[in-house]
Image (tube, helix red, strand yellow):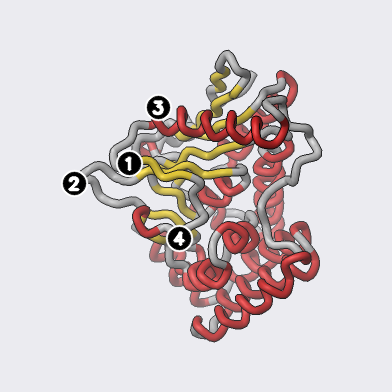
Amino acid sequence: MSSLRIDRDADGIVTLWLDPNPAKPRGGVVVLDSWLVGAIAEACATIAREGCSGLVLASSSTRVFVAGADLAEIDALDDAGLHAYLERGAAAFASIPALGVPTVAVVHKAALGGGLELAMHCDALIGTLPAEGEKPWLVGLPEAGLCICPGWGGTQMLPARIDPKTAMVATANGTPWKCADVPAGLFATVLPAGSTQSQLIDEAKRWIHAERAATHGGSAFAPQRSPRRTVTPADAARMEAALAAARAAVPASAHADACFDCVRTGFISGWDAAVAAERAHLVRLRHTPEARAKLSAFLAK
């Protein structure tokens, strides 16, 4: 039985709800800690056994989609433990595209770091804007702002969805976007300001139905589908040009160089090598004086 709620409609589309850790509720904020990583893997295994025609990934939080990884939990791990944690997360996230059906993440609030990486393992992201008077939320990969780098494929997936130079510069600088300023391509659809979670889920289901009809005449997707949208060696020339432009636009630093190295690894050697490079850089960077100062200040808040 899954620890996360799984709803199934009459068409076989499943909605998987991301919940806060019941042992660490954090005021209702969903955080990617070990509990949630395990719960995602468990839920996807249940869905795979039972089958589905599509998956909607939604958050039960009224405050965020997913706020990112649990930095306190990560910081308490030794290097071997952090490697293992990142590998478990990668395997859990990979179980979403491995379902072999169209998948959509419903991003109704902030999606940062690992939260955005989780969402980008889906085929499409559906977003919305704040209601009038509501504070704008952030979307992006802020890890470099702490002098570290993404660890779950962010350097690979973001340049495949939006203008690659824009993606590389934002990742290397660690600067997320306000939801109204998210670059074109990240969201398949953006609903009007103040749209409800239910409306976003309905839109996600419409996207799934349209995708199935366009690709397979309405039948369920075959499991041979492309696993995720990412940088590939087939796009090396375009990514190399974007990388050169991004390097010129970003001040040199250990964390920026790590982000750029991961991108280059992706379009030279592919996904597995690039995500392994992310893990190695993240484990190494967190010990630098710059990262220690930033992480200590963040965790002291």
Q: Earlier in the sequence, mark 2 or mark 3?
A: 2
Q: Which residue is mark 2?
A: 133
**What SS does tag 4 mark?**
loop
Q: Earlier in the sequence, mark 4 or mark 2?
A: 2
Q: Is residue 266 above or below residue 190?
A: below
**Nearer the observer, 252 or 218:** 218
Position of residue 288 measured from the top left corner of the image (x, y, whole percent): 56, 75
- Mark 1 Cα-neighbour bin, 10 Å: few <14, some 14–19, many ≥20: few
Q: Earlier in the sequence, mark 1 or mark 2?
A: 2
Q: Taking the image as drawn, is residue 291 in sight? A: no
What separation in Å lies between label 1 and label 4 (alpha carbons)? Answer: 17 Å
What separation in Å lies between label 1 and label 3 (alpha carbons)? Answer: 13 Å
**What SS does tag 3 mark?**
helix
> What label does residue 198 carry, if any?
3
Q: Is residue 108 above or below residue 196?
A: below
Q: Which residue is mark 1?
A: 192
**Nearer the observer, 197 or 142:** 197
Position of residue 191 measured from the top left corner of the image (x, y, whole percent): 38, 41
**What SS does tag 1 mark?**
loop
Amino acid on which disc 3 is placed:
Ser
Q: Is residue 289 above or below residue 248?
A: above
Q: Which residue is mark 4?
A: 183
